Image (cartoon, helix red, strand yellow):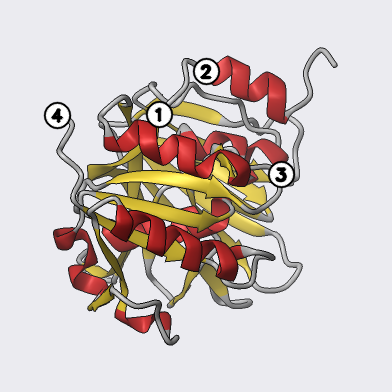
Amino acid sequence: MARRMIRAVGIHPNFTKRRCRAVFGQLSAWLLKEGCSVWVSDDLGRELPAGVQRVAPEALGGRLDLLVVLGGDGTLLGAARRLYPRQVPILGVNFGGLGFLAGVAVGDLYGALEQTLRGDYTIERRMMLRASILGRNGRPRATLYGLNDAVVHEVGQRLLDIRMRIGESMVGVFRADGMIVATPTGSTAYSLSAGGPILNPLLDALIATPICAHKLSIRPVVFPAFETIRLEADVSGGEILLSVDGQQVLPLHPGEAVQVGRAEHCSCFVQLRQRTFYDVLREKLKWGT
């Protein structure tokens, strides 16, 4: 993806994070002083600093050359879905905890922006997934997009019998609390907690990870991203949900299935330092310390 000249910058803040409100105001003033136009989503619902412009949420991506996300990884997941399918570069500033995705510390914000504005950065493309609920007629009733994962699970504590197909092949019926389908980016999130493998984000693959499977022989499966996975679960005994990135939730009706595959477009992240994926793993997971 060719780097673009940055003139229009969006800010996606999470005001529940400590210091975020103050940084938002300071950042807006700094960007305006640098000659950038500054945009926020119209649903931000706050009085804005002078010079900051509003735009409808669905039109945000079409306005921007760069989106600065102020928050944690959860805030960044929401921002990536909001931009989809626009491939606007995202610069994540970590106000949260672990910060796998939001890689810029608050104290490094302005140095990172100076580097970005002068074009001294690379773009890392991250696969997104598409999760569709298929009705009895086989047609999508609803489609959600995510960066991390799609999860089929039951509202209560009941085990599910989940029938899984990958491509044209029947894989099996798995008794578990649910099933996670994760991207390489999502491999270090919920899937990892459920015992799934870590994938390098450059891999073109997806993971199916059972949640608390009833048998020890049931293990995660890694499959090529050009294939789709189909999950069917019995909904007669309780309410079953499809959850995407832990932020979008839809119920499944009797006779419906979930189909998950690679989305048509990816998310793009600004990379500023020569830090490898394995450097991030070692730092965040405290390997060798």
Q: Position of residue 162 (x, y in %)?
A: 54, 53
Q: Residue at x 33, y 35 (%)?
A: 116
Q: Position of residue 265 (x, y in %)?
A: 21, 44
Q: Position of residue 64 (x, y in %)?
A: 20, 56
What amino acid does circle 3 point to? Ala
Using the image, determine if residue 253 lies above or below residue 247. below
**Is residue 245 in sight in this rendering?**
no
Number of residues whose C-alpha sits closer than 10 Å to that of mark 3, classed few (under 14), some (14–19) or many (20 or more): some
Rounded to the nearest angstrom, the CA distance separating label 4 from label 2 is: 21 Å
The residue that disc 1 covers is: 271
The residue that disc 3 covers is: 213
Contact, CB < 8 Å: mark 4 with mark 1? no
Q: Secondary structure at mark 4?
A: loop
**Is residue 272 in sight in this rendering?**
yes
Contact, CB < 8 Å: mark 4 with mark 2? no
**Quadrant in which the N terminus appears:** top left
Sequence-wise, the earlier of marks 3 and 2 is 3
Q: Residue at x 30, y 60 (%)?
A: 32
Q: Depth check: 70 or 157 in front? A: 70
Using the image, determine if residue 83 lies above or below residue 179. below
The residue that disc 2 covers is: 275
